[in-house]
Amino acid sequence: MRTKKWQWALTGIVAASLVVSACGNSNNNAGGESSPSGTAPASGSKQETITFWSWVPTDSQSKKVIEAFEAANPDIKVEYWRGEQTDFQKKLQVAIGAGEGPDLMGMQVGGMLNQYASMLEPIQPIADEKWGAGWEEKFVPSSIDQVKAKDGSMVALPLNLTGQEFVLYNKAIFDKVGITEVPKTYEEWKQVNAKISEAGIVPVAMGAKDTWHDVDMFVALSNQFAPGKVYEAEQGKVPFTDQAFVDTMNAWKRLFTDKVFQDGALGLSTYPDARDQYFYSGKAAMFMTGSWHVGFGLPGGEKEGTAIENDETGAFLLPQIGPNPSKAVASVDTALAINKNSAHKEAAWKLLEFLTLGEGQQIMADFIQGSPSKIGVQVQTLDQFKTDSEKEAVNVVNREIAGAIGKRLLDYPELNNAIGIAMQDVAAGKDVESALKEVQKVSEGIAR
């Protein structure tokens, strides 16, 4: 998981957005190369070639995905180009700006999707015709609104999702101190932490230096105090000085004053600091992170070569701190869109359908590259994990994301920045009401 500044320019428009997205597995190629296709068309038939650009699937993943698609569609050849996110953005903006570009392309929801919306093929009419009424119900509910532009038009479909807030835990440490169940409430969490502290181990590692992670916590926590209200505030319909956000900030502050998070959390990044210095070193029993981290125990994954390589690990949802149940918040990590100028829209649609509602969705789920966007898809490769708790962690994450209460990522970069700074200030001792007034001031200045 990395935090990146994405910048793009389209016909003189420059937009910047903080984007947090899941990364490919460490044993995949860096990208920037086209993946060859394999299946030949039937004798005498004409093969249509379509181009597909994205950052997901990775190169090694794309080989299996494209081979499966071409086997089912021998009259279509896919030329796939993958680039790291920054390289992908640069190449795409030049191509689309020239009225060209790939037939099918990856999209980030929010700012990027809105910038390119007028150059993308409307999806709703095609889906209505191909799939009939009610097709949206086949997707995770929180994902559908996210692939719509500001004007309400649907211009993409979700490939996968990532969500917050989850806690990785070291079961070996839990077992050592006599903890038999993961905490579900704040009081249970504090009791668990007390046992761990008595053993001389840091209970929870949090990288609060990262504003993106702090904002993730704000969105997740606020939905425990007033479900959905943060999205109203995002659109300027509710002030950030509302009591629900005062309660949210006070709950956040308690995580520091109650010593739930480790000392010095504000000075540490999530990656690599909190992860490597605390959790992977065995110094901390738990680590605050997102759904994208649930595959870290796979062969060749991040866990290999660390001090906890042989420890059994798992994951659980952020415990309930507010009056309402804890729920995951999830955002579309990768969306897929058809170029409005494509000369191969029907073939591009077939690939889009394959990846989102077809066999490709299962293939991607089995790579554990984000959570499935299609309801009912179950990971069939859990036997790769060594322990039951690691297998169950994947199920926990996918189940919680499928039932997410709302989106994870807020639309406006300046609002994300203001919330993140306010949370850091509050954690450092600033008055909650004063910090929220600063957030509201920024919110009032946003042109929505």
Image (cartoon, rainbow, N blue to C red):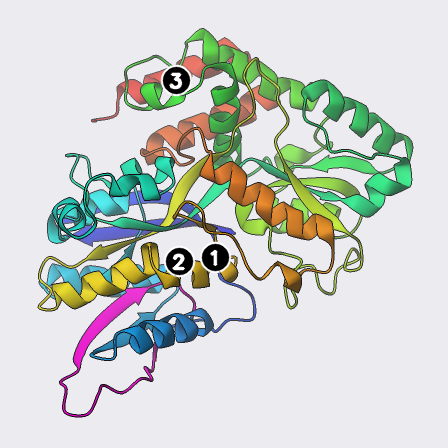
Q: What residue type is labelled 2?
A: Gln
Give the farthest residue toward the front: 132
Gap in angstroms between the C-alphas marked 2 and 3: 32 Å
Give the farthest residue toward the top: 243
The answer to whether residue 323 is above or below residue 359 is above
Q: What residue type is labelled 1?
A: Ala
* Magenta part, dominant SS: loop
Report whether 178 appears left or right of 387.
Answer: right
Asked whether the beta carbons under mark 2 and mark 3 sit within 8 Å of each other, the answer is no
SS assignment at label 3: helix
Magenta part of the chain: 32-58
Q: Residue 41's spot in the image, x, y percent?
A: 23, 86
Q: Which of 385 and 127 is in front in this view?
A: 127
The residue labelled by disc 2 is 361
The label on residue 229 is 3
Q: Which amino acid does label 3 sit on?
A: Lys
SS assignment at label 2: helix
Give the residue displayed 58% in from the left and 16% down from the top: 322
Q: Residue 312's spot in the image, x, y percent?
A: 77, 52
Q: Nearer the viewer, residue 304 or 144?
A: 144
Gap in angstroms between the C-alphas marked 3 and 1: 31 Å
